Image (cartoon, grey):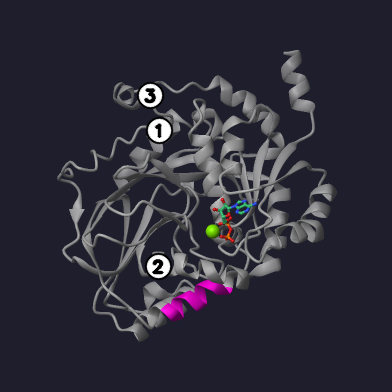
Amino acid sequence: NGVLMSQMSRPCQMMLLVNPQSGKGQALTLYNNHIQRMLNEAGIKHTLVITERQNHAREMVKEADLSQWDALVIMSGDGLLYEVINGLLERPDWEEAIRTPLGILPGGSGNALAASIHHYSGASPVTSEELLVSCGFLLCKGLVSHMDMVSVHLCSSPRLFSFLSLAWGFVADVDIESEKYRHFGAVRFTIGTLVRLASLRVYKGRLAYLPATRDHNSEEALRSNTMLCKDRVPPVTLPAVRDSSFHNSCHSNNSLKVRRVESTPSRSVTKALPGPHDSLLPPLDQPLPDDWVVVPEEDFVLMLAMYQSHLAEDLLAAPEATPDDGVIHLFYVRAGISPTALLRLFLAMEKGAHLTTNCQHLVYTKVRALRLEPYSPKGIITVDGEVVEYGPVQAAVHRGLSRLITG
Ligand code: ADP
Ligand code: MG
């Protein structure tokens, strides 16, 4: 009890990971100009960790003594959070580790999660330094929500986890081709889009998905309530859940330790590997169950699976998404769309209006899992904006598996 009391009364400790190379290379300057003072004024103790190379953050959080930290906050683009999440889920104590409250401050060129958090707060859209100040403020408020995680299976790479998006075709190509314009900041996607539109192509493959039904949703909510989040409110009010402030997480960390997860029989199959069991997915080389839908088209311009609202600072790709709706918002654009019509879609997406443009080539559906088998031997698939192994891929959502500071 003495230990509990002293832990509860110690001041909040935040690890702030800054990538000095992200975006325009200004993350440290932005920290000095805005964030340091905001955190000090809010009385939030933090330790600055400057990342030195790719995978530095991933290795650090994999080994870190997480009991020392009440929150891990990333100041970079989405790429650094992707590393941190995968590092946490590679730990033997992943169940506990992934519940560490995570925060993000936009310091990169792809700041989709930061833009999503700002959007969830109900504030009107902003970009650049205004977005940073807003996210800094929400971080200081410190309220924590649950966030969905999507597990991604590839042919020969180990399973990985995603918090934002899975893309193939036009969007994936633009994302990667535009990395050379990173020094322009978020404008890189606009430049990349225009360049790709000029040489628009068709991507062939087979797409299938498990539809998200109302039943599934409450089933999943119940399951995640029993398995992971006993403190959550009933499923109907789930999207709005704000369970605690990370300032109180010394307290909540202790209470989390009491909650044990009962292992299910099927879990023993994947026991050797850390991370949650994927009950929705058969092995990638096995046929899909009957309740999956196979998309009739095989010629696409893009496939985009989103689990947060924003694809980039100024692209509201999934207007309906909330941090823990337990849904993958699946979009695909059929081949045959003209470059002009596709451009119109992306322009409308700035306001999240692409679904109301009546574009006959755009399909939107809510799913819990999906499988994509590209036919072409070469190409780009991205997860959270990072390139992954090209080839067959499947993914399934784990509702509210992680925790995110949303303010
Ligand atoms: P951006 O939005 O600018 O792409 P990201 O956060 O996505 O920013 O970071 C881009 C990549 O930089 C990530 O893959 C990350 O692993 C890598 N990285 C992190 N720290 C460093 C560093 N010090 N030098 C170079 N690359 C780094
Ligand atoms: Mg990036």
Q: Please, what secondary structure does the residue beneath circle 1 have?
A: loop
Q: Do the residues under discs 1 and 2 have CB atoms within 8 angstroms?
A: no
- As shown in the figure, which amino acid type bears the numbered disc 2? Asp
Q: Would you say residue 50 is visible in this rendering?
A: yes
**Nearer-N-terminus badge (1/2):** 2
Q: Do the residues under discs 3 and 1 have CB atoms within 8 angstroms?
A: no
**Assess mark 1: CB under 8 A from ligand 1?**
no
- As shown in the figure, which amino acid type bears the numbered disc 1? Pro
Provide residue 20's location: percent of width, then percent of height: 69, 56
Label 3, label 2: how many angstroms apart (C-alpha)? 35 Å
Q: Would you say residue 304 is visible in this rendering?
A: no
Provide residue 212's location: percent of width, then percent of height: 30, 50
Q: Residue at x 24, y 74 (%)?
A: 335
Q: Which residue is label 3 attached to?
A: 272
Label 3, label 1: how many angstroms apart (C-alpha)? 11 Å
Provide residue 383's location: percent of width, then percent of height: 43, 54
Over which residues does the magenta segment extend?
Answer: 187-195
Query: How many C-alpha atoms fall within 10 Å of the one at disc 2: few (<14), some, or many (≥20)?
Result: many
Label 1, label 2: how many angstroms apart (C-alpha)? 30 Å
Q: Which residue is drawn at 48% across and 54% down?
A: 322
- As shown in the figure, which amino acid type bears the numbered disc 3? Ala
**Nearer-N-terminus badge (3/2):** 2
Q: Which residue is label 2 attached to?
A: 173
Residue 313 picture quarter: bottom right
Provide residue 107's location: percent of width, then percent of height: 66, 59
Say whether residue 329 is magenta. no
Say which of marks 1 and 2 sits in front: 2
- The quarter of the image that holds ligand 1 is bottom right
Q: Which residue is label 1 attached to?
A: 276
Say which of marks 3 and 1 sits in front: 3
